Image (cartoon, grey):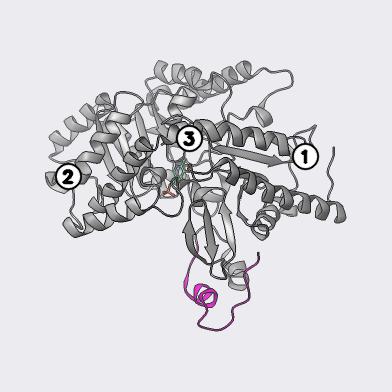
Amino acid sequence: MAPPPPSGANSAVARDIANVLHPYTDLQAHQQAGPVVISRGKGVRVWDENGKEYIESVAGLWCAALGFDNERLVQAAANQMRKLPFYHAFTAKSHEPMIDLAEMLIQRAPLPMSKVFFANSGSEANDSAIKMVWYLNNALGRPQKKKIIGRLKGYHGITIGSASLTGLPANHRSFDVPLPGFIHTMTPHFYHGALPGESEAEFATRCADELEKLILAEGPDTVAAMWAEPIMGAGGVILPPEGYFPKIKAVLKKYDVLLVADEVICGFWRTGNYWGTQTLNVEPDIITCAKALSSSFLPISAVMVNDRVFQALADESHKIGTFGHGFTYSGHPVPAAVAIETLKIYDEMKIGDHVRAVGPYMQAALQRRFADHELVGEVRGTGLIAAVELVADKAAHKNFDPSAKVGGRLARLCEEHGVIARTVMGDVLCFSPPLVISQQEIDEMLDRVGKALDELTVQLRREQIAVVR
Ligand SMILES: Cc1ncc(COP(=O)(O)O)c(C=O)c1O
């Protein structure tokens, strides 16, 4: 529902307009439209300041895995604040929450990993890993091997390095990124990218061939690493074609290029396995994670490195005298304590078994309800991550003209019907609900989304915005 007009200079809406610079918002339009002020949450639901209830279909920003209340996490934070509210990790200082969490992550890693570095956000984790890759190649005596490959439509964050890795125009335009040395290879999306008659396996081979061509064109001795989300999230929930990652890995291995898995969305059971790398058969040298690590109750992220990477970092730091990188809040004891409790809760409640039960239920329900809808081109996903992509022309896989702002309209209609929805890339409606969602809540969420989609269909017909069936 559209927020009510500011009812006075002291309303939350008016004070927001007066004082807040919002991320990912048309700042000028916001001066008139104002915010939706969310006041409280419970389970998969949040309520705005007027008492209107919404189901959060993307767990906030793909992150509130345990939903919007959890007393154990509250207690973990409070207990840690009483015991040791802050300590840092610089110059070999340490504390138990950071040590315990690092050990838990190493134990749960999908491949043998050696050490864990902590930061506060997905962007910081990726920026830290970029700097580690550069540092490593200096340590190995190949200072020219520094270029980093991202993928078009990949999302890795918004700090200068991670935004350079990101392959989305809105994160580059007018910000003067990507920095030199960041290059992008093709998006592995079969629905849009496949040639006529091409099989998924052939498409995956072509993606790997394109990567090899790019590395050869740049010069293999200048290319250091490639970054990949197991499933691209913000680019539109794009699952790679069958066999994609082993083919990509073979190319990277040939030219001694590291593979970094960005598990910021996919980690911690989102895809039905503990890690997206397990679902998609990725073999990374470095893993970054965040979001569900603490169920987003407090900010924390991590970079896990394998032994080869660690040994190079150790050698170089010994030569220089220090590993000159780290944040005041790297491994902060309070978010670390919350993350430890979060991982314990995932284990104890067997959240993976739950995702493996409700995930296929959600995927089947999305297919049954929306795949044949006249506005829908593709329904895709796995586990509890999915997308419904709207198209103007089903046969040609053609999206709506961006000027029609179809995705934004759908998100607003979803809100009117009680679902906070996220549309990306124009017309892709994403689903990434809290992992604790039940089948009944999935049905309720999709009933509401269905109503919004039907209403959008009526509006588009009325406005004669073309839909080719
Ligand atoms: C895959 C991925 N990597 C990195 C990030 C950046 O994380 P943050 O917003 O915590 O900096 C995101 C955020 O959505 C993400 O989806």
In the image, the segment drawn in magenta is: 1-22
> What kind of residue is marked 3?
His
For label 1, the crowd category at 10 Å Cα-Cα, with few meaning under 14, some 14 to 19 and many 20 or more, is some
Left or right placement of residue 176 versus residue 206 in this view: left
Magenta span main SS: loop
Q: Position of residue 325 (x, y in %)?
A: 24, 45
Which tag, 3 or 1, sits closer to the chain's start? Answer: 3
In the image shown, does 138 or 460 lie closer to the viewer? Answer: 460
Which numbered marker is on residue 373?
1
C-alpha separation, residue under disc 3 versus residue under disc 2: 30 Å
Q: Secondary structure at mark 2?
A: helix
In the image shown, does 391 or 50 lie closer to the viewer? Answer: 50
Residue wearing tag 3: 354
Q: Closer to the camera: disc 3 or disc 1? A: 3
Q: Position of residue 52 (x, y in %)?
A: 59, 65
Residue 253, quarter of the rendered image? top left
What's the residue at 22%, 54% (across, down)?
Answer: 80
Q: Quadrant of ligand 1?
A: top left
The residue at label 3 has a CB less than 8 Å from ligand 1: no
In the image shown, does 313 or 469 lie closer to the viewer? Answer: 469
Q: Position of residue 428 (x, y in %)?
A: 65, 43
What's the residue at 49%, 54% (across, down)?
Answer: 175
Residue wearing tag 2: 96
Q: Secondary structure at mark 3?
A: helix
Which tag, 2 or 1, sits closer to the chain's start? Answer: 2
Q: Closer to the camera: disc 3 or disc 2? A: 3
In the image shown, does 109 or 309 lie closer to the viewer? Answer: 109
